[in-house]
Image (cartoon, helix red, strand yellow):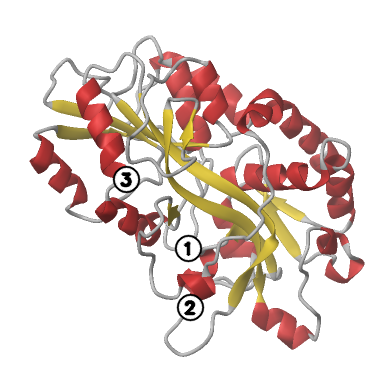
Amino acid sequence: MTTYDTAPPARRRGPLRVTAGLAVAMLGLGACSTIGTGDAATDDATVLDVVTHDSFTLSDGLLADFEEETGYEIRQVAPGDAGALVNQLVLTKDAPLGDVVYGIDNAFAARAVDEGVLDDYVSPDAAPGGTFAGALTAVDRGDVCINVDHEWFAAAGLPEPVTLEDLTDPRYADLLVVTNPATSSPGLSFLLATVGAFGEDGWVDYWAALRDNGVRVVPSWSDAYYVDFSGSEGAGPRPLVLSYASSPAAEVTDDGPAPTGALLDTCFRQTEYAGVLAGADNVAGAQAFVDFLLSTPVQEDIPGQMYMYPVLEGAAVPPGWAEHAPLAPAPHEVAPEVISAHRDTWIETWTQTVLG
C-alpha cells in the first residue's frame, strides 16, 4: 500500500500490502508517526481500537451491528498496506496502536509473531488449518496471478500463455507488465510465486529471462492495471498484467463474456489474518472482533468489498465467481517462516537482477 499499492478492480489493495525500501522508509518515520485517527489504544473499555490495512472495508451497517451487539465503540486506524501495517505494529509494540489487527498476510505473519506484537488468541470459529502460531486467525484468502486480455490475443491470432515459463517465450516479448515487489504487495506476491515455482536455485534466472523478454515493471498495481494493461478501462499496450484471480469478475458486463481471465498456473495464494495485539487495553473486545470477522455476514461480505474469498466453507460468494474468479487449484507457496527469513534479501536480489 505506501503505497503498497494493491487494489484490484473495484478497489482492493490495491492490493495491499511492503518492501525493503518501504520498510526503510517506515523505520525512518518511526514510532512518532501519527497514523489514522492519531489515537493509540484507549483505557476506555467501551472503545475498541481496530488496526487494519488500508484496503479494509465492509458494507454499511456491519460494523454498526457489531457495536450495537457488543456495546463497543469502534475506532479504526489504517497505517497503509499489509507491509506498512506490520512495520508500524513492530515500531509501536511498546505502545500499541490499538486492540486488534486485521490484514496481516502470510508474507508478514511470521515477522509479526516473532516480533511479539500479538497476544495468544485464535477464534474458536477458525477454519480448519486457519490459524498461525496460536496468535493469528485466517479471515480471507485470494490469489495473485497474471491476468490476460482475451480479446487482444484473439485479435492477434496468438495463443495465450499458460505457465510461468511461457512468459519467457519470445512470442510474448514486451507483452507483460508487473509491479515492483519493493513497492507493491501484488509485486511481492508474484516474486514469491516465482520463488515457490523455481526455488532458491532458479528464481533469479527466471527473472533474468523475464527481463530479457521485455517485462515492464511499474511501481503500483493501479499503474499496471489501469495504464499499461490493454484489458480494462485503460488502453494500454500490454495484454498481460499482474493482478488478482478475482479481477476478471470485475470486468464482466451485462452484454458479453469476461474480456479478461487469470492464468491459474501463475498464482501465489495470499491469506489475511486477524489477531489480538499484545498490550491491548480491550482484550475482550479484541477477541470478539476476531470472532466477528468469521461471522457469516462478514464472511459473505468480503468478496464484494475486498475481492477476496472467505475462509469458511459454505460462505456464499457472488454469482459468477465460480466462472470468472476461481481460485487456483495448485497455487505456488512459500512457508511464512521462510518468507520472513529471506524477504528483504530476495527483494534486494530482484532489484539488482531486474532493474540493475
Three-letter amino acid code at disc 3? Leu
N-terminal of the pair, mark 1 or mark 2, is 1
> How many residues crowd mark 1 within 10 Å: few (<14), some (14–19), many (20+)?
many
Q: CA distance from mark 1 to mark 2?
A: 11 Å
Q: Secondary structure at mark 1?
A: loop
The residue labelled by disc 1 is 9
Q: Residue at x 78, y 70 (%)?
A: 161
Which quadrant would residue 117 be assigned to in this image? Answer: top left
Residues at circles 3 and 1 in contact by the CB criterion of under 8 Å: no
Q: Which mark is residue 294?
A: 3
Identify residue for label 2.
252
| Mark 2 closeness class: few <14, some 14–19, many ≥20 residues within 10 Å | some
Look at discs 1 and 2 and give the one toward the viewer.
2
Q: Nearer the viewer, residue 342 or 6?
A: 342
Regarding residue 302, the answer to whether it shows in the image is yes
171 horizontally vs 223: left or right:
right
Residue 124: which disc? none
Front of the two marks 3 and 2: 3
Relative side of 270 to 273, left or right? right
Compared to residue 48, the image places residue 350 above or below, namely below
Residue 14 visible, this angle: no
Residue visible at 63% across and 45% down in the picture: 189
Q: Amino acid at mark 1?
A: Pro
Determine the secondary structure under disc 3: loop
Residue 183 relative to residue 101: left or right: right
